[in-house]
Image (tube, grey):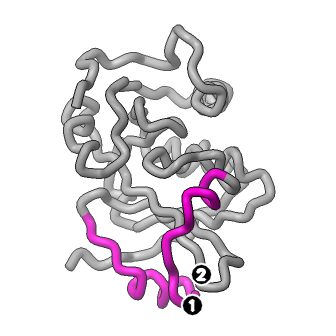
Amino acid sequence: MNIDPVLYPGRPEESRLEKEMRCYDLLDLLGIPYIRADHDHADTIELCHEIEKILGCHICKNLLLTNRQMTAFYLLLMPGDKPFKTKDLSKQISSARLSFASGEQMLDLLDITPGSLSVLGLMNDTEGKVKLLMDSDLMALEYVGFHPCINSSTLKLKMSDVIELLVPAMHHDITFVELPRE
């Protein structure tokens, strides 16, 4: 993977995709500082491990899930090194069996393509169709990495800024869950 070893404070100077630029606009509007790393497309958590070393923070695993009837959608943020089992989550949120939402649903709900999913996509969920779930283990992190709705850049943000400023500004609430490590 080609990663630019230079870390950039703030937005790129050149124009990029509109959905990526909206992320920078929102963060700047809220006064949330961030560090940016540009790199080749990183659409799996395994590819993000090199980026984590450069940014000096963990990158979240982001999963868009839906119930069997496809009437409820959940964005789950969890540590990248933690395995995910749907049964562990289903019980905690009192939902029928969960499965992964399709790429089409991801695009429709959050204007994000698979491999680029992040909490920043919630800014595109103006109707509040997606519920935000966060593994409580993330609260132990001072900094966390997210893609700005495109997987060729990763942003380092303070977790406290994500919880206290970003999520409320996107008009979402967080439901904390506890997923087992084993």
The 10 Å Cα crowd at callout 1, few under 14, some 14 to 19, many 20 or more, is some
The residue lying at 40 percent from left, 67 percent from top is: 136
- For residue 180, above or below residue 154: below
Name the residue carrying label 1: 96
The residue lying at 30 percent from left, 51 percent from top is: 45
**Quick one: SS at disc 2?**
strand
The residue lying at 71 percent from left, 78 percent from top is: 71
Name the residue carrying label 2: 67
The 10 Å Cα crowd at callout 2, few under 14, some 14 to 19, many 20 or more, is some
Of residues 123 and 165, the one nearer the viewer is 123
- Please state, as top left, top right, bottom left or bottom right, where the C terminus lies in the image: bottom left
- For residue 158, above or below residue 16: below
**Quick one: SS at disc 1?**
loop
Image coords of residue 23 (percent x, y): 60, 32
Magenta residues span 82-107
Structural distance between the alpha carbons of marks 2 and 1: 6 Å
Q: Are marks 2 and 1 in contact (CB under 8 Å)?
A: yes
Image coords of residue 180 (percent x, y): 29, 79
* Mark nearer the N terminus (2 vs 1): 2
